[in-house]
Image: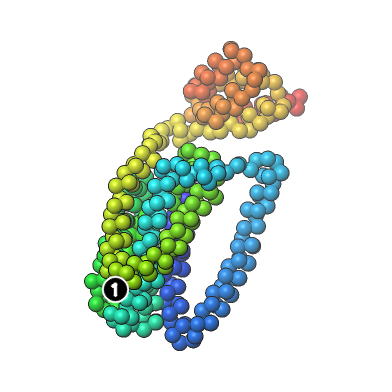
Amino acid sequence: PEENERKKALGLAIAFISFGSLFAPPFGGILFEFAGKALPFILLAMLALFDGILLIIVMRPVRDERKIMQISDDLPKATPIYHLILDPYIAICAGALVMANISLAFLEPTIAIWMRKTMNASEWAIGLVWLPAFFPHIFGVFLTVKFASRYPTKQWIIVAIGLLLDGLGCILVPMCTNFVGVIIPLMILCFGIALVDTALLPTLGYLVDSRYVSVYGSVYAIADISYSIAYALGPIVASNIVNLFGFTFLCVSVFFACILYIPLLRILRTVYKYENFVETEDTDKEIVCEEVFNVQDSLIDKSELYDTLNPLNDDSPTTLNKRSLYKYNRFNSINRDSRSRINSSRNSINNPNIETTYNAISNDNEH
């Protein structure tokens, strides 16, 4: 359930990130064409200020909680970022994010020049050509979340398909001869990017959960670095390639780069190696005896608790889970006889009314 919720939350975040990225060109192009170059920057500055104020308000409970955890020394320590980047799984995911976004980063600064030369396009048309790509991007996010929830071990296949579509969209762009024709390959390209991003970001979170401490700042910083590398190289490398070899050569190069990276994704097949959880009648009825253990820890003698729990009958649907068993074994003074009774009670401790046991222990202490 936690993994599915993470996929949905990240999918929603990616959808709005893509909306900002794809809405920016028509927004800037239209305002630049009809209102001058200053107005887009003024509006963006006001929007950023408003967003910052909202973040300060919304994130205040999180900051307060972190302060409390720091005071009580309960704040988990994040794994250093250089340790994470040396993990082959994380490195491959980061590389795939770079490859997926290189196409967009290379096309955005160069497609405007190409459209002016081949189609004599205006500024607003050059910007508007990106806007329809938002809709297949949203569909790609939705499709990936649904597919990943049903087949969580096959996300590397989603990434491979996304890179293939990414490269295919790139190589189709130079074949277009009009404004409407350019929209179609850009929609294919953005659909592929959505598949890659939506599949890989939850995978990075899962890798940190399963292999390191469950603190996600460092691993998502690696994802941001991957985006930054793609968009930092885009204007520099792409403009030089276009000047030396032409726009078509650039698109073909991106296509082959995406295709050649796909075989590396097979390594991610082993990321989600786990046994599927099969819900049984016992696990459905299992409860955590948290109150009993808290009372035991502070109010009564350990042996008294064991003697209280041991004679419980076998007709109860409740069983001790692993966390409860751990709390038993936590105490250093458990003797061999008590330990064996606890281990046997893991499968047989039953009571039709656990509240009766808890109340009996509490009343015992009061008397």
For residue 266, above or below residue 30: above
Quadrant the C terminus occupies: top right
In the image, what residue occupies the spot 48% across and 38% down?
211
The reply, left or right, for residue 48 in relation to residue 238 is right
Residue closest to the eye, 25 or 297: 25
- Name which residue type carries label 1: Val
Q: Can residue 145 be seen in this view?
A: no
The reply, left or right, for residue 47 in relation to residue 177 is right
Quadrant the N terminus occupies: top left
For residue 70, above or below residue 190: above
Packing grade of label 1 (10 A; few <14, some 14-19, many >=20) is: many
In the image, what residue occupies the spot 49% across and 51% down?
222
Report which quarter residue 297 is drawn in: top right
x%, y% of residue 200?
A: 40, 51
x%, y% of residue 345?
A: 53, 21
The residue at which mark 1 appears reads as 182
For residue 174, above or below residue 38: above
Residue closest to the eye, 133 or 326: 133
In the image, what residue occupies the spot 65% across and 53% down?
63
